[in-house]
Image (cartoon, rainbow, N blue to C red):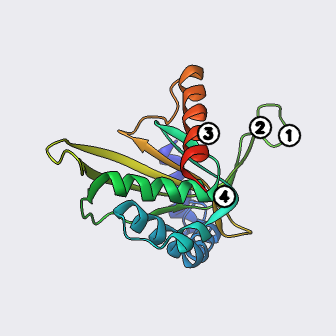
């Protein structure tokens, strides 16, 4: 089969390869113009350098923060979580040359089939490694490699879901863990968010 393709290409003088669409590239570059400031604000929050109002402004009103410790369902709670972790710990995020990878929204599956999956949201992802040291016990330190995954709403240009995936693992392991995270997130907001 490879020979036939090669001969046809040679005989007609043109390549048989299908031209690549530039639509995704254009969409990704337009997405970069509005998503980059959101991503930078969140990256600075992970480093402890943020303004609470500016950070709150990047999240949609029904935004969710999710990591293996808890699920927080309000922008105010998300900001308070960042404030609390930086109050409890000195956080040192290792400098990296990695940039956010942007993924425009995509539809998956077979459109006219029961196997079709819903439209996937636009996403931004960044790998980072942070070292945490408890302020009360500075000798207690741990390093945490994580992937920040942001689901972005293209219309409102806000973050709808923020996941911190530790060690490349899913944020929820099973139903019991999911229930614990919801309980922990509920009490965190009830106790610390005013």
Q: Position of residue 194 (x, y in %)?
A: 61, 57
Give whichever of discs 4 and 3 has the lower sequence position.
4
Give the number of the mark in front: 3 or 2: 3
What is the C-alpha distance between the residues marked 1 and 4?
19 Å
Residue at the spot 37% in from the left edge and 70% down from the top edge: 49
Q: 99 or 109: nearer the eye?
A: 99
Residue placed under numbered mark 4 in the picture: 105
Residue at the spot 45% in from the left edge and 57% down from the top edge: 82
Is label 3 in a helix, a strand or a loop? helix
Give the number of the mark in front: 2 or 1: 2
Residue 112 - label: 1
Give the number of the mark in front: 4 or 3: 3
What is the C-alpha distance between the residues marked 2 and 1?
7 Å
Give whichever of discs 3 and 1 has the lower sequence position.
1
Is label 1 in a helix, a strand or a loop? loop
- Within 10 angstroms of label 3, few (less than 14), some, or many (20 or more) residues? some
Is label 4 in a helix, a strand or a loop? loop
Residue 110 in view (yes/no): yes
- Within 10 angstroms of label 4, few (less than 14), some, or many (20 or more) residues? some
Marks 2/1 in contact by CB < 8 Å: the verdict is yes
Residue at the spot 59% in from the left edge and 47% down from the top edge: 189
Residue placed under numbered mark 3 in the picture: 186
Residue placed under numbered mark 2 in the picture: 116
Residue 151 in view (yes/no): no
Q: How many marks?
A: 4
């Amino acid at each position: 089969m490879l020979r036939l393709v090669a001969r046809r290409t040679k005989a007609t003088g043109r390549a048989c390869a299908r031209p690549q669409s530039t639509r995704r590239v254009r969409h990704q570059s337009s997405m970069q113009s509005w998503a980059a400031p959101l991503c930078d604000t969140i990256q600075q929050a992970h480093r402890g350098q943020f303004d609470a109002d500016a950070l709150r402004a990047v999240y949609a009103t029904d935004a969710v923060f999710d990591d293996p410790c808890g699920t927080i369902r309000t922008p105010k709670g998300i900001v308070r979580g960042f404030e609390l972790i930086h109050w409890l710990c000195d956080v040192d995020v290792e400098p990296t040359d990695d940039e956010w990878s942007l993924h425009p929204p995509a539809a998956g599956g077979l459109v006219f089939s029961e196997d079709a999956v819903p439209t996937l949201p636009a996403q931004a992802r960044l790998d980072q490694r942070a070292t945490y040291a408890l302020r009360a016990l500075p000798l207690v330190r741990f390093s945490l490699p994580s992937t920040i995954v942001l689901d972005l709403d293209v219309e409102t240009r806000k973050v709808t879901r923020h996941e911190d995936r530790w060690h490349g693992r899913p944020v929820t392991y099973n139903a019991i863990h999911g229930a614990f995270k919801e309980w922990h997130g509920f009490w965190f907001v009830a106790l610390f968010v005013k």
